[in-house]
Image (cartoon, rainbow, N blue to C red):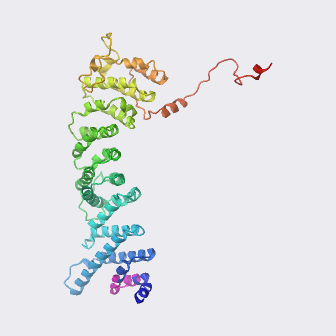
Amino acid sequence: MHQESDEDDFNIEEKIQLILSSKSNANLICDILRYLQAEDLDEEETALACIGLEKWFTGQIANDEILKPTKVSSKVTFQNWFKKQLESFIRIIMELSKNEDFFDLSMQLLLRFYAFELDFKTKAISNVGIQKLVVTRLLSFEEDRSEEISMFEEFFIYPDFTSEFMTQAAQMLSKCTDRNELFCSNVISTLNLIGQTFPHSGIDSDICMSDNSKITASKLKSAFQSMLIAFLSKRLTENMTKKILIGFENYYLMLDSPPIMADYITRCYDSDNLSISILALHSLFKLITDYNYEYPEFYPKLYKILTDDIIYSASRIRFLHLLDLFLSSPLLPLSMQAAFTKRLARICLHSPSPVILALLPLIFNQIRRNQALRFLINSPDPKEMDSDPFDNTTDDMDKCHAMKTSLWEIETLRKHFIPEVSKMANFMAKSLGIKEQEIPIDVRYSGFLKLNEEKKEKECHLQVEKPKEFLSCELFTE
């Protein structure tokens, strides 16, 4: 009964004021720390106690006296006691962070102590432990942390903080084998946020959490690379593989050695999932063009992907724009360019009308870029053939006989029942013009119909006087 009475009489506000008013009242800290370990804590009093103690500890650290080496026994005793109490307080805050009611408060306090440790190096604050707590929280296996991750942007702008976070995250990712959807989504959200705050222009002390930071761009890139490799070391679901591939274009700029990702990208490019292959295309192409990665099978596999299935893929728009980019290289052999152009023309015959309007500009641009391909639409030595020598069933561009054929498909499309298709085919047959054709960004029927609705309708004159009704009542009179 006496103990319960003591707890009821425990006045947090009074004790905090006493501690802050005089160093001689420091022994009251032990009472407050004991109070914070109770089971049923009042939110308001807990916040008051934690903020008060944080103010006292950081004030003592900033005063610098507590960290100065001394031979005075009383000061040495106080310094040792101070560090033990600080360590206890940090452990209590970390324990409180497990309670959702105190998580926001705990995290704010821990991150303030984290910054103090970087500047003053008390050795009583475990920055590694704090980072592990942050990593475990953000990279949750059970809950979507996207909102909390976005709130951490104010900390990820500091390269020294971000580097240590990625180091701890890499260790966690390399140890755990689970790659469920929620966990992967949290990791990818974190990687993307780090990409947004990454200091591409360089690192100096002004943008670091601590002025004493020795972080370099190379070290930061190495930490990001370790985290990404650790994450990709275990198999991801197809959905998560697509999400990570979308961000690869930005990831390259944050890697210490981008070609190290070549094995992963090529495996994705070889995937049986068409969408994954398409998403891996651009990443692989950037490795080849920007980082001198040698991959002779790039165009043969690209030709293999170019089938009727591509026009029904959810990523067809992305693919068609990338294909236009890939085929713009002047170093491609003529036979290879002819094979791609002919297969595109053949696919046009099996495509919905909106997609044809995206495929024809590809063919148009390809012939216009390389005048040597004009023989496909206007042969200098025309011949009559019983059948088309082009073999669309083979994926070997050297054996498809594209150099012996013509684009008779364009002539067929000139008679297409959709006016826009026939108009574009007619334009190609007559003249290639002086500029390249743009590939549309919408190849759905909804966009196609909307485009037609925007055109001004012309009134059809059927007779001199416009009828007011469909049937006259006089027809039914006796």
Is 327 or 347 nearer to us in this picture?
347
Residue 446 inside the magenta-drawn segment: no
Residue 58, position as x, y percentages in the image: 33, 75
Q: Nearer the viewer, residue 416 or 323?
A: 416
Q: In this view, does 39 lie above or below 445?
A: below
Which residue is depicted at the point 33% across and 87% down? 24
Q: Which of 94 and 432 is in front in this view?
A: 94
Residue shown at the point (24%, 80%) measured from the top left: 80
What count of labels does the image hold?
A: 0
Q: Is residue 436 visible?
A: no
Which quadrant would residue 265 be assigned to in this image? Answer: top left
Q: Is the magenta stretch mostly helix, strand or loop?
A: helix
Q: Give the range drawn in magenta.
A: 16-30
Residue found at the very far bottom of the displayed protein: 2
Q: Which image quadrant for residue 197?
A: bottom left
Quadrant where the N terminus is found in the figure: bottom left
Q: Residue 290, position in %: x, y?
A: 25, 40
Quarter of the image with the C terminus is top right
20 is within the stretch colored magenta: yes
Left or right side of 81 for 469: right
Could one spot residue 250 in this view of the protein?
A: yes
The percent position of residue 107, horizontal first and vertical second, equals 36, 67
